[in-house]
Image (cartoon, rainbow, N blue to C red):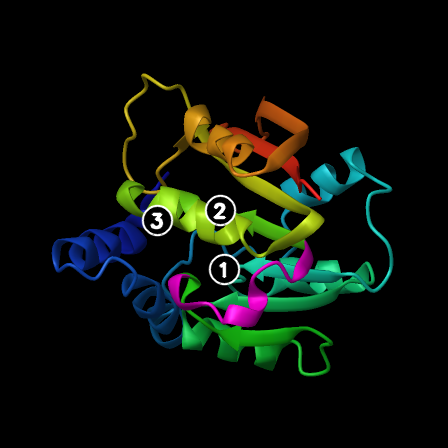
Amino acid sequence: MNNHRATARQLAQEAIAAGHPLEWFEQLYAQALSEGVSVPWADHVPNPNLIELFQKIDGRFSFGQRALKVGCGLGDDAEWLSGLGFDVTAFDISPTAISVCESRFPNSKVMYITRDLFQAPDNWSGAFDLVLESYTLQVLPPELRAKALKQISEFVLPGGYLMLITRLRGDSEAIGSMPWPLAQREIDTLKSQGFVERYSEDYIDDEQPAVRRFRGCYQREA
């Protein structure tokens, strides 16, 4: 049942062993384009967990606000946000992924950018009303996640929001294989970084097999 993740897991393992833990994303998207291998998180539709989260926190946003999609993949979530009226910037470390976004959505209002999270432009700091991170942290090696979450949180302007969707595990539960679920204590570091939790949910989704997930909305203190 996990065969669609086999290539991604192999590429991730090899890249981490070689000391280049982020290189496998471009390798995966390039092989998906040229060889048809599976990108496990690319369903070519907006993430239903994101749509449900927006329904639960309805009313916090207004037309024209700036949004940033972290690790945009093939663009479906970014396009969905744009359809709600956000001024969306979406980035991914994979040039191939960004090229596919531009091909899929040639008339898009979204600004698609190839960018490494850890080499973000200075003018992104505190620049966005909404930052969306879904399924990116869980495919980063655990030793990079604290740094990544802090970087992501710094994109949010004072009074703005960070929305987070990820796999979740118990604090004493083994981390397993990629995608590596986050522990609640990792997510809770946001509270010590100037964020107030406005909504959170630890739930079991309806996938087969079912997956334990977390989704939450955090507001940066003004």
**Amino acid on which disc 2 is placed:** Tyr
**Crowd rating for badge 3 (residues with CA inside 10 Å; few <14, some 14–19, many 20+):** some
Gap in angstroms between the C-alphas marked 3 and 1: 11 Å
Q: Which quadrant of the figure contains the C terminus? A: top right
The span shown in magenta is 118-129
Q: Could you tell me residue 85's position as x and y percent?
A: 83, 63
**Identity, as a three-letter code, of the amino acid under mark 1:** Gly
Instruction: Determine which quarter of the picture holds residue 217.
Output: top right
The kind of residue tagged 3 is: Leu
Dot 1, crowdedness within 10 Å: few (<14), some or many (≥20)? many
- Residue 28 is tagged as none
Q: Is residue 26 magenta?
A: no
Asked whether 140 or 144 is in front, the reply is: 144
Q: Is residue 194 visible?
A: yes
Question: How far apart, in angstroms, are the residues tagged by discs 3 and 2?
Answer: 9 Å
Per the image, the residue denoted by label 3 is: 140
Residue at 47%, 71% (x, y): give it: 97
Q: Secondary structure at mark 1?
A: loop
